[in-house]
């Protein structure tokens, strides 16, 4: 089918991206608010539009275990989860990246229990930032669809797994017109997955055997080297996608940053609200810009330093929270800017944690507040 | 039926591995892998089996082996089988080789689910009745009163009957086997290999250090386990058709228990109680045939 537009929720947009990328094995387990991804995938498979083996696992842990081995056996693999499901997978997330299995997983950001809640909060995936997975944060269903396809391309070049992440409800369940690219476009963009190393008696290679200290050291170094290529490859993958479809996102988006005196920095759905706030503040004559961080792992340190070096004030908005350290993006941006000659003043605000609504007005208040105070080293609760 | 010693010729499992000399688990691996043959992919979780199969860059198994996490063997095996099938490589056997800890305990959820989905895999539990790799702690396969390093006063509860639980999933094939009966063991592997769907075999494999058995005695202890009726050899097809493969010779359980230092603290009354329990189990099993 050629490219066409359809009204889709963010989750269903992901499912269409998956269909176009043609994974062959999909082990998956339901959890709110991810379940519509799973349901649409099974529907597409039943309708004959997706030729994949779907394994209805009994847990996310087993789903990820099967993702790893299916990937190591030489086929393209997809799964999706959220919150508690991602928490249960934790052991296998490390196992997947260690096995260099380029699995693509959609994660729908949802609060982690206890107590139980269902709201958009990015702590679930951000707490997995050190598992060796590439992480993309998306703002709309269209972006998630496009990013799923891009993620396969990048992951399979570096042989590392990747998460494509969007927030509960704001993105996952919001229905918007989404362009579904044509299959030929995707086929042209994404070559078949044919790994040289795989589990096959005809080859005889194994994986996971006990190694000594030096082998382990080298293995981690190799993973690091692969990660080092990701910023560049993700940038190129996005450019190539833009040339084919007209849609590109970059690994970061700079909005009105050129002459900005203050730059708001955030990820995911909040970027849309922030863009609106920037427009209003600009009309009022305030030189405000926005930095949307899309690729969070690897963290594009070089790009962040380049974009923010001449900016006097940066306001980081985190819809996530790590007790004892604060907002994740706040920590990462401070670390990225460390040692820079004229490093900006970095304010970190905890907004929207637990899914609390953040309006353009809230963001404008935040800008006014930051203009009036000097930055604290720690993230500050606002609300 | 005579006990015989037909060892399969195919050399998939090799010598020079790291098992304790005389280990029952290593012996079982030799029979199992040489019977399955080279068109096989193995899945091994942490256990003595993992030690026997490695370490990098060596392998004692001339097949691809994926070493998985302790609780994920069945799911990992399913992932391989499904990925082979979608590539048209349907002739390849996928076998999980897991310990009792990785099967009865932490891996049970994934195992039960794989059985429910009737995954096309062979799952073999090498049951040495404890967590031997971590220094002989109890598992739910450890029998009543056996000493382990986590039950120094003897295990207060009995052994979980995993064969019956798996049979209750009504999968195509469930069997028990042990290294003292190589013909029976290899016949069951051959039979399983010819079948489709979920196949589960629990193989009793005496552990020398964990059970307190001399290097030369694994096979003798294994035979006594069967001939006392403590570990009967049987198979269950589709959860319904029971076949007792060997009629125990009725040797008193005391003879078996005395071969192992893990039972040395047992009183005469306790031994009698074990005898009664074994008698009841054998009656129950015969009735099911
Ligand atoms: C999640 C997890 N918990 C604990 C361990 C530590 N561990 C490694 S092997 C093992 C015991 C395995 O016992 P069993 O499956 O019976 O195999 P055996 O060593 O007896 O052959 C344990 C607890 C682990 N590897 N993973
Ligand atoms: S500890 Fe026991 S199971 Fe492990 S290798 Fe030694 S004899 Fe075999
Ligand atoms: Mg054991």
Image (spheres, helix red, strand yellow):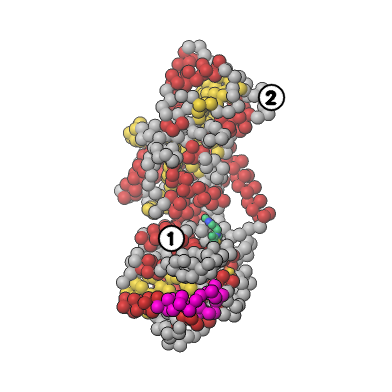
Secondary structure mainly formed by the magenta segment: helix
The vertical placement of A333 against A14, above or below, is: above
Give the alpha-carbon distance from disc 2 to disc 1, as whole Å.
57 Å
- Which of the image's four quarters has the C terminus of chain B? bottom left
In-front residue for pair B61/A131: A131
- State yes or no: discs 2 and 1 in contact (Cβ < 8 Å): no
In-front residue for pair A382/A276: A382
Residue labelled with disc 1: B108
Q: Chain of mark 1?
A: B
In-front residue for pair A375/B183: A375
Question: Is residue B264 highlighted in magenta?
Answer: yes
Question: Crowdedness of circle 1 by 10 Å Cα count: few (<14), some, many (20+)?
Answer: some
**The quadrant where residue A257 appears:** top right
Residue A243 visible from this viewpoint: no
Residue A373 visible from this viewpoint: yes
The vertical placement of B269 against A342, above or below, is: below
Question: Which residue sits at x=64%, y=24%?
Answer: A343
Segment tinted magenta in the rendering: B256-276
Question: Is residue A344 highlighted in magenta?
Answer: no
Residue labelled with disc 2: A341
Question: Which residue sits at x=43%, y=76%?
Answer: B274
């Amino acid at each position: 089918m050629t490219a066409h537009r359809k009204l889709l929720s963010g989750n269903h947009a992901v499912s269409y991206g998956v269909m176009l990328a043609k994974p062959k094995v999909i082990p998956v387990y339901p959890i709110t608010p991810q379940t519509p991804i799973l349901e649409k995938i099974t529907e597409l498979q039943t309708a004959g539009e997706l030729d994949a083996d779907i394994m209805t696992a009994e847990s996310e842990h087993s789903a990820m275990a099967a993702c790893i081995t299916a990937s190591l056996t030489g086929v393209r693999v997809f799964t999706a989860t959220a919150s508690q499901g991602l928490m249960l997978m934790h052991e296998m997330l490390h196992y997947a990246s260690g096995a260099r299995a380029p699995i693509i997983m959609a994660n729908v950001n949802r609060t982690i229990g206890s107590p139980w809640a269902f709201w958009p909060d990015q702590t679930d995936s951000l707490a997995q930032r050190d598992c060796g997975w590439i992480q993309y944060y998306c703002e709309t269903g269209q972006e998630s669809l496009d990013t799923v396809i891009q993620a396969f391309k990048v992951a399979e070049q570096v042989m590392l797994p990747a998460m494509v992440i969007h927030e509960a409800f704001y993105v996952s369940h919001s229905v918007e017109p989404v362009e579904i690219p044509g299959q030929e476009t995707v086929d042209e963009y994404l070559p078949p997955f044919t790994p040289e190393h795989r589990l096959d008696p005809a080859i005889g290679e194994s994986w996971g055997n006990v190694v000594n200290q030096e082998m382990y050291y080298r293995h981690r170094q190799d993973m690091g080297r692969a990660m080092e290529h990701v910023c560049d490859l993700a940038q190129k993958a996005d450019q190539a996608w833009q040339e084919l479809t007209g849609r590109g996102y970059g690994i970061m988006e700079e909005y009105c940053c050129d002459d900005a005196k203050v730059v708001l920095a955030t990820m995911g759905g909040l970027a849309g609200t922030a863009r609106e706030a920037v427009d209003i503040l600009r009309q009022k004559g305030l030189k405000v810009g926005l930095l949307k961080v899309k690729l969070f792992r690897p963290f594009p340190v070089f790009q962040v330093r380049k974009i923010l070096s001449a900016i006097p004030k940066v306001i980081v908005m985190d819809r996530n929270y790590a007790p004892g350290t604060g907002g994740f993006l706040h920590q990462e941006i401070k670390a990225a800017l460390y040692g820079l000659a004229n490093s900006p003043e970095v304010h970190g605000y905890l907004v929207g944690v637990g899914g609390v609504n953040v309006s353009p007005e809230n963001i404008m208040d935040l800008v006014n507040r930051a203009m009036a105070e000097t930055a604290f080293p720690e993230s500050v609760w606002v609300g | 039926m005579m006990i015989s010693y037909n060892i399969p010729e195919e050399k998939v499992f090799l010598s020079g591995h790291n098992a304790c000399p005389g280990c029952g688990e290593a012996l079982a691996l030799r029979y199992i892998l040489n019977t399955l043959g080279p068109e096989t992919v193995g899945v091994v979780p942490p256990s003595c089996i993992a030690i026997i199969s490695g370490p990098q860059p060596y392998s004692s198994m001339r097949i691809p082996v994926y070493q998985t996490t302790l609780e994920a063997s069945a799911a990992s095996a399913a992932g391989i089988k499904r990925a082979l099938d979608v590539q048209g490589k349907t002739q390849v056997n996928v076998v999980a080789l897991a310990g009792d800890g990785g099967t009865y305990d932490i891996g049970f959820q994934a195992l039960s689910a794989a059985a429910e989905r009737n995954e096309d895999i062979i799952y073999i539990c090498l049951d040495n009745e404890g967590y031997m790799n971590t220094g002989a702690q109890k598992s739910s396969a450890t029998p009543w009163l056996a000493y382990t390093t986590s039950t120094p006063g003897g295990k207060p509860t009995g052994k979980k009957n995993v064969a019956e639980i798996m049979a209750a999933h009504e999968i195509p094939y469930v069997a028990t086997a042990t290294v003292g009966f190589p013909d029976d063991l290899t016949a069951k592997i051959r039979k399983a290999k010819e079948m489709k769907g979920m196949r589960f075999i629990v193989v009793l494999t005496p552990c020398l250090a964990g059970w307190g058995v001399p290097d030369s005695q694994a096979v003798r202890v294994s035979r006594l386990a069967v001939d006392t009726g403590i570990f009967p050899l049987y198979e269950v097809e589709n959860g319904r058709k029971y076949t007792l493969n060997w009629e125990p010779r009725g040797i008193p359980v005391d003879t078996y228990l005395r071969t192992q230092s893990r039972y040395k603290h047992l009183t005469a009354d306790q031994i009698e109680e074990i005898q009664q329990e074994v008698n009841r189990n054998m009656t129950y099993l015969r009735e099911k045939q």
